Each structure stands twice: as structure tokens, then as C-alpha cells.
Amino acid sequence: MAGLMKYIKNGDKKKLMQELGERVENCKRCELWKTRNKPLVGDGDIDAKIVVVGESPGYNEDLQGKAFVGESGKVLNHLLGLAGLQRNDLYITNVLKCHPPRNHSPSRKETDACIHFLHEQIGIIEPKTILTLGKFASREIFKMFGMEFSRIGELHGQVFMTGKYAEKMKIIPMYHPAVACYREEMLPVLERDFSAVKGEL
Ligand code: SF4
């Protein structure tokens, strides 16, 4: 991390992110490279104060190489609006950079192979806040920062502070927007959580 900070202080964030993107494009550290169409490194502003982390690219994201397109993307845009945010205020990425076939839950092996890319991205961007979407991303980010994760049903919408890096960051776990696509009754819960954190962002 200290090495990264040297480049960041030299104003070379863009170069670091480009190099990281090239490594993701060529990555074969787990089997998912064999079935992906386009790996998704991340979308948005590398100077953003807020990083949003999901689980992995879905079917449409894999085809387009873009984050949160399709129905869950529409829900996310709606929720971000309630929090006073737009897409261009953020950097959006996932724990896994390649689409798992049939949307299988990422295995421990796949996660361990990929998570260092996310670690580097957070080191380059140095956000003030990380919004995690869903149980999987929330658990992995809590683990990254040495924090104990219980259940998304218990932690959603709450603000946690971490002091692992030079400056403190807020970690805010949320339900995944996709849940509102197949469980309508979850939309008001998500809407309440995103509206409530408006003042924190
Ligand atoms: S999911 Fe991650 S580790 Fe696996 S091939 Fe893609 S970029 Fe590499």
C-alpha cells in the first residue's frame, strides 16, 4: 500500500488504474476467464469520494463491460437519487471482475484469486465512503478491513467507521438492488436505507 501511495501523491492515479485494468483483462488466476466475454474492472470517476462495490458482473454486464446495466441498474439509479447521488458521483466495481456462469455464487477460490484487484482499487481511489451491495460484497469488504460481519439483515443501512488506512473511511452495507427485482416488498426497505444515509455521503 505504501508503494501505491507514492504514485497517488505523484498524481498518477489514472496510470495506476490503467495498468490494473490491463492486468484484469489478461488475468487467468481463476477459471472464470474461460467463460467471460468482457471483464468489468469498474465504471466511473477515479477521484470519487464514494466507491460502490457489488458481487460480480451479471449476464448483461458481461456482454457490455459496464456496471449495473439492466433492471438492477435501474433500481440502483433510483436508490442513488434518494441518497442525493448520481452515477457520475461514484466509482462502481465488484469483488469479482468476471461473470460467473449461471450467476453462481462466487467460490472461496474465485474470491481469493480476485480480491486483490479490489484492494488495489480502493488504495488508488482512497474514497471517503464504501457502499457495499448485498451480503457477499459486504462480508468481503468487512473482512478486508478486519471488521466482524454478522448478517446483512442485521447490518443494512448502518454506518461503520474503519481506520485501517491513513484516513478513516465509512463502510455502509446495503441490500443488493437486485433483490427488489424479485421481491417487491424489499424496495421500500432499500428506499428507506438509501434515503437515511443521504446526510452521511
Ligand atoms: S474473476 Fe478475477 S481472478 Fe478470476 S479470471 Fe477474472 S479477473 Fe482473474
Image (cartoon, rainbow, N blue to C red):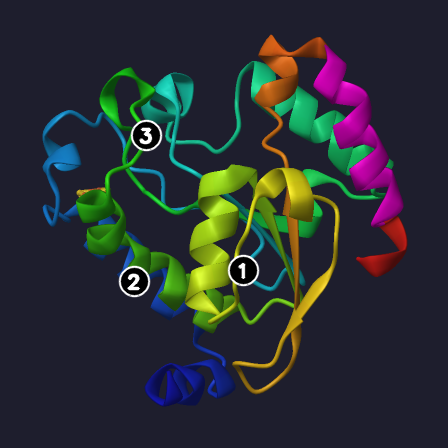
Badge 1, how many Cα within 10 Å: few under 14, some, many 20+? many
**Looking at the image, is mark 1 or mark 2 nearer the viewer?**
2
Can residue 25 be seen from the camera position used here?
A: no
Q: Which of marks 1 and 2 is nearer the N terminus?
A: 1
**How far across and how far down the image is residue 152, in percent?**
59, 41
Lower position in the chain sequence, tag 2 or tag 3 = 3
Query: Does the residue at mark 2 contact the one at mark 3 (Cβ under 8 Å)?
Result: no
Label 1 beta carbon less than 8 Å to ligand 1:
no
Which stretch appears magenta? 185-197
Kind of residue indicated by mark 3: Ser
Query: Is residue 195 in sight in this rendering?
Result: yes
Query: Where residue 81 sits in the image (x, y, percent)?
Result: 81, 34
Location of the N terminus by quadrant is bottom left
Q: Mark 3 points at which residue?
A: 105
In the rendered structure, which amino acid carries the disc numbered 2? His
Question: How far is the residue under mark 3 from the one under mark 1?
Answer: 28 Å
Residue 163 numbered tag: none
- Marks 1 and 2: CB-CB under 8 Å? no
The verdict on residue 7 being magenta is no
Nearer to me, 83 or 173: 173
* Marker disc for residue 116: 2
Query: Does residue 10 lie above or below 147 as drawn?
Result: below
Magenta includes 193?
Answer: yes
**Residue 132: x and y, percent?**
57, 47
- Which residue, given by chain and number where applicable, does mark 1 sit on? 46
Q: Type of residue at label 1?
A: Ile
In this rendered view, identify the residue nearer to me: 182 or 27: 182
Q: Residue at x 59, y 21 (%)?
A: 179
Which structural element holds mark 3? loop
Ligand 1 shows up in the quarter that is top left
Q: What separation in Å lies between label 1 and label 2 (alpha carbons)?
A: 17 Å
- The quadrant of the picture occupied by the C terminus is bottom right
